[in-house]
Image (spheres, rainbow, N blue to C red):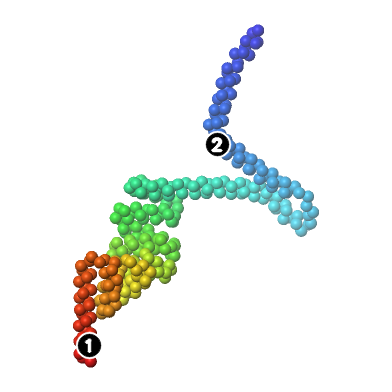
Amino acid sequence: MAFFFLIENIYPEIFILITIVIVLALFWWTDLYEWLRRIWLAISTIWRSRKSVELPVVIISSQKAEIESSDTQKWGVVGSQIQDLITEKIYTSNLETLISLVSSSRTLIARGMTTEAQVLIIQWLSLDKHHRDLNLLLATIYEQDWHYEKAEYIYKDMVTLRPDDVEILEKLANVLIIEKKYVIASEIYKKIHASTGNTETTLYMLTHISNTLGDAESTMIYAKQYVLQWPKNPEIIALLANVQVILWLRRDAIETYKNLKNLTPYSSEITETLQKLLIEEELANNFGSKIA
């Protein structure tokens, strides 16, 4: 009876012990599974390597030295394979972390939390200083804080590494325009134009930059190319009409102002300018006929 009593009293302790083991197993299951997986991977790699060595092979004397040398390197090769697997896992983990960091930084910037985003970005750039997306985000933060010189420095550094990246070239040119460095911005947009062709953004920017620089002929060329594909933009049409007047292309300017008047029929300024050009053209025709 005493023996049975002792056994009966042990049941609660056994139940508690089993419960603790189950809880610990559930709590550490992920780490335990990863640990067991790595061990199994290492063992299977070693087993495959040993199995390949144990295959019956007919060896000639000229191969003997080479095989003896390979036997001494066998375990080094296996260790290298395991190290490669570990390195690959670390790289994958870092890549996932980086993607998450970029997403988090963009969210913080969108919420106006630029200081917090800047801290995250700079921390990672200390490990990978040439990462494209992180550098673009950091330059965006500098632009929002009006630190255009710092943004310009980042974009120039990135253009050196990626000279054909259109997005980076556009961002650099736009910062230069803000800093009133129009000549360099114009050259950059010309490079973009040579690379991408007649895109709306490129022609729009080249038209405005040329007009700002007082280059009437270039303004007219880019404005014509723009209007040919996007004929309902009053802003560009007005620039085209204006430079046609400057270049004494009065008849062309009249036609351009007529198109502009159709798009903005309630603009008194455009109406007055058109009437003035019509009168000047009529006088010029009358004066020319009298001379003839």
Would you name the residue on which mark 1 appears?
A: 288
Nearest to the observer: residue 196 or residue 200: 200
Q: Pointer 1 and pointer 2: residues touching (CB < 8 Å)?
A: no
Number of other residues with Cα within 10 Å of mark 2, as a class: few under 14, some 14 to 19, many 20 or more: few
Determine which quarter of the picture holds residue 186: bottom left
- The residue drawn where x is 56% and y is 34% is 29
Q: Amino acid at mark 1?
A: Gly
- The residue drawn where x is 57% and y is 35% is 32
Up the image or down, 220 lies above or below 27; here it is: below
Would you name the residue on which mark 2 appears?
A: 30
- The residue drawn where x is 22% and y is 77% is 277
- Taking 46 as reference, is 207 left or right? left
What quarter of the picture does the C terminus occupy?
bottom left
Which secondary structure, mark 1?
Answer: helix
Look at discs 1 and 2 and give the one toward the viewer.
Answer: 1
Image x and y of residue 93, in percent? 51, 46
Image x and y of residue 22, in percent? 57, 27
Q: Amino acid at mark 2?
A: Thr
Image x and y of residue 130, in percent? 44, 56
- The residue drawn where x is 31% and y is 64% is 177
Image x and y of residue 207, in percent? 32, 69
Q: Return the residue found at the far bottom.
A: 292
Q: Return the residue found at the far top.
A: 1
Up the image or down, 129 lies above or below 251; here it is: above
Determine which quarter of the picture holds residue 43: top right
Which secondary structure, mark 2?
Answer: helix
Number of other residues with Cα within 10 Å of mark 1, as a class: few under 14, some 14 to 19, many 20 or more: few
Up the image or down, 28 lies above or below 188; here it is: above
Alpha-carbon span between mark 1 and mark 2: 94 Å
What quarter of the picture does the N terminus occupy?
top right
